[in-house]
Amino acid sequence: MEIDWPEGIDKIVDHGDHWHLYKNGQEITVVHENPKSHYPNAEYIDERPKDYSNITVENNEIFTYDEVKPEVKDGLREFLKKKDMRGIVDMEGFGDLTNETRPVYGSETDENGQPIKKDIFYFCHNGDHYHALTIKQIIQAAKAGEYGSFTARDIVAAMKWSIENKEKLVTFTVSKNIDAVKNYLKQYYHIDDENDISSFGNQIGIYGIKADGNPVYFNVDDDFTVENGQIKSIKPLPAREEKTDQKSEADHQKELPVENVNPTALTKVTLDSVKAFLIEKYPNSEVSAISGVLYVSKGEDEAPIEFKLTDFAIKDNKIVEKK
């Protein structure tokens, strides 16, 4: 599949089997082909998980989820916390995602090179994709010494306990991490709807602050600090803008006759232009782009709406949906 590489990318986050592309602090898309050659001057952040796929697992070492009793061994919580093993702690379910249209990342691949979607631990990240882990991968990591004196069965048993009891194995102390800052912003702006706040990498976007419906973005590293065990903003946070019926200069420009608008403003349908169109059309939803496909997520209980660039055209110097 040919990728329509967006322009102006200034940051790449490498997750091993996929890459997140950013522009001016905003995630633009996720791709499955290494983008470094396309953006040689972009900031590169390596967040690849440890790979133990070369470690052999014998048939007699394999066990199933049902064979393990849910329990948490003494000392395991402290170990997970000390090692900051959020990839284990964050898992919220076990089972199959074979009917899930959103991408699944992290699990071992099948004979066709596709991520396994059956019998996996998983959690939904940012509403538009899943991170997953198989029991075989946990066995490989245990054989590599990743879990210290704890066995793969110990890890699976604890994860099963967490899933069945709907309780996190570890509550991490307040630090300048993405979740702590998100909780701080939720309280500050009185956010109840999870669709109004999204995050990835070190970026957090919030809808409902700007009157025009566009999100405001915050950088966890640059905009926040920890004082006396509490998250604090380094600079004053923007106030919510009141919505107004007065038309902005941008709105006025949209209504100008075509001959009065820069004729080169829109020459082709791009990911950026379509994403902007969808954000305006669905102001209370989350819009994401993965491998040239755009998704509009209205809520956890609704499947995301999928759009392709071929669904759109340019008419009167504007992006429009094809009928």
Image: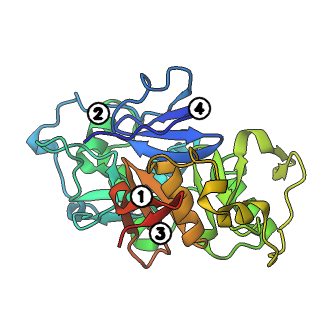
| Residue bearing the label numbered 3 | 297
- For marks 3 and 2 on the same chain, the one whose residue lies earlier in the sequence: 2
C-alpha separation, residue under disc 3 versus residue under disc 2: 39 Å
Q: Is residue 169 visible?
A: no
Q: Position of residue 321 (x, y in %)?
A: 42, 67
Q: Work out whether 48 lies above or below 180.
A: above
Residue 143 circle label:
2
Foreground disc of the pair 2, 4: 4
Query: Which label's residue is closer to the chain start, 4 or 3?
Result: 4
Judged by depth in the image, the label closer to the viewer, 3 or 2, is 3
Q: What is the distance, in whole Å, between disc 4 and disc 1 at their CAs? A: 20 Å
Q: Residue at x 85, y 58 (%)?
A: 238
Q: Is residue 35 left or right of residue 187?
A: left
The residue under label 4 is 10
Q: Quadrant of the C terminus?
A: bottom left
Amino acid at circle 1: Leu
Q: Earlier in the sequence, mark 4 or mark 1?
A: 4
